[in-house]
Amino acid sequence: MVLKSLPPKKKVHLFVGLTEVQLGIYKNMLLNKSLSSGNKTHFVNILMQLRKCCNHPYLFEGIEEEGLPALGHHLITVSGKMQVLDKLLIKLKAGSH
């Protein structure tokens, strides 16, 4: 049984830009360059690799800088989607959602 007093579901599409790190990886993939120096990577499915880049650049090995904490603010600042999500969560928490 479903509660009949629930308001109808709303969908909101947000278009988010890429960060500088994401843009660099994206362009390198389109130009078929390696992600890090000395590492020649052949992408079998370029579309899936570009999708991974748009989600978060740390999904690729060798992108994250050495010495950074495992859970830090750098996880948010390097991805456009994570930046929007961070702002959205703060706003929703302030509104008691």
Image: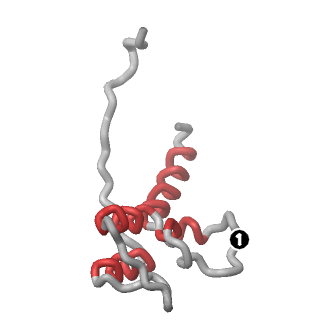
Image height check: is 24 above or below 86?
Answer: below
Quick one: 17 or 62, which is closer to the camera?
A: 62
- Residue visible at 39% across and 20% down? 6
Q: Dot 1, crowdedness within 10 Å: few (<14), some or many (≥20)?
A: few
| Residue drawn at x 59%, y 71% as measured from the top left | 74
Q: Position of residue 21 (x, y in %)?
A: 45, 79
Question: Picture coordinates of residue 47 (x, y %)?
Answer: 29, 64
- Residue 7 lies in quadrant: top left
- Give percent across and percent down for residue 78: 50, 72
Q: In the visual, does 86 lie left or right of 13?
A: right
Residue in the foreground of this view, choosing between 30 and 1: 30
Q: Residue at x 54, y 73 (%)?
A: 61
Q: Looking at the picture, tell me which residue is in the foreground, 70 or 31.
A: 31
As drawn, the residue found furthest toward the top would be 1
Which residue type does callout 1 highlight? Pro
Could you tell whether 60 is left or right of 24 in the image?
right
| Render colour scheme | secondary structure
Name the residue rendered at 33%, 30% in the picture: 9
Residue 32 figure quarter? bottom left
Q: Measuring from the top left, give residue 60's x and y in whole percent.
A: 50, 70
| Residue sitting nearer the eye, 94 or 69 | 69
Outermost residue toward the bottom?
38
How many marks overall? 1
Q: Quadrant of the N terminus?
A: top left
Tell me the SS state at disc 1. loop
Is residue 62 depicted above or below 88 in this figure? below
Instruction: Identify whether 13 is placed above or below 45.
Output: above
The residue at which mark 1 appears reads as: 69
